[in-house]
Image: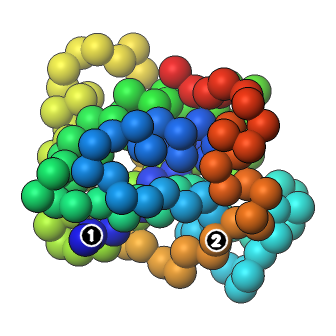
Amino acid sequence: METATFAAGCFWGVEDAFRQIPGVLDVAVGYTGGTKMNPSYEEVCTGRTGHAEAVEVKFDPAKVSFEQLLDAFWETHDPTTLNRQGPDVGHQYRSAIFYHSPEQQAAAVASRDRLQASGSLRRPIVTEIVPAQTFYRAEEYHQRYFEKTGQSSCHR
């Protein structure tokens, strides 16, 4: 089992998208990339913790590659909007790949560069590609939020 961590706006839709991928074993929503230890949702929403709403994806690399997860990441959000996804605005909604190894870093950079060179986006990609930090699991009511509430996805 390997771990991948992504931020792409509101974590509920990102979690839902990754749960649909065969080979993904588990997805947790939470916070990472900031300075506040054990932040709460309310604290992250202020934008003062430095954390992004993110997902931690546990996956079986024999069934799904990190590159396939990157493809899903790019498809789930607009990587050209700085600190914003749809109506959600703030650094906590930034686009980021938090890599766990030099191999993940190289794959993320190559994937970003291929997407940018493809000409399919009208603006430059602003996604951060940074080392993984401590991932703080969000409160339980945020886990599997769409399943619990019956809402549909808020992402592309």
At horizontal 11% and vertical 58% (from top left) the residue drawn is: 62
The location of residue 90, given as percent across then percent down, is 73, 45
Report the label total: 2
Residue 145 appears in the rendering: yes
Q: Determine crowd level at label 2: few under 14, some 14-19, many 20+ residues with C-alpha closer than 10 A.
A: some
Secondary structure under the numbered disc 1 in the rendered image: strand
> In terms of image quadrants, where is residue 114?
top left
Amino acid under disc 1: Glu
From the image, tell me which residue sits under label 1.
Answer: 2
Of 139 and 42, the residue lying toward us: 139
Comparing 80 with 21, the one in front is: 21
Q: Earlier in the sequence, mark 2 or mark 1?
A: 1
Residue 41, percent across and down?
A: 81, 62
Q: Say above or below: 132 vs 83.
A: below
List the residue tagged with mark 2. Answer: 137
Mark identifier at residue 124:
none
Distance in Å between CA atoms under marks 2 and 1: 17 Å
Residue 103 position, x and y percent, is 14, 67
Q: Residue at x 22, y 61 (%)?
A: 60
* Residue lying at 36% horizontally and 64% vertically, measured from the top left: 58
Q: Is residue 46 left or right of residue 120?
A: right
Tell me which residue sits at (55%, 74%) in the image.
Answer: 135
- Look at the numbered disc 2 and give the secondary structure of its residue: strand
Type of amino acid at the residue the image marks with label 2: Arg
- Residue 112 appears in the rendering: no
- Between residue 116 and residue 6, name the one nearer to us: 6
Q: Position of residue 155 (x, y in %)?
A: 57, 27
Mark 1 nearby-residue class (10 Å; few <14, some 14–19, many ≥20):
few
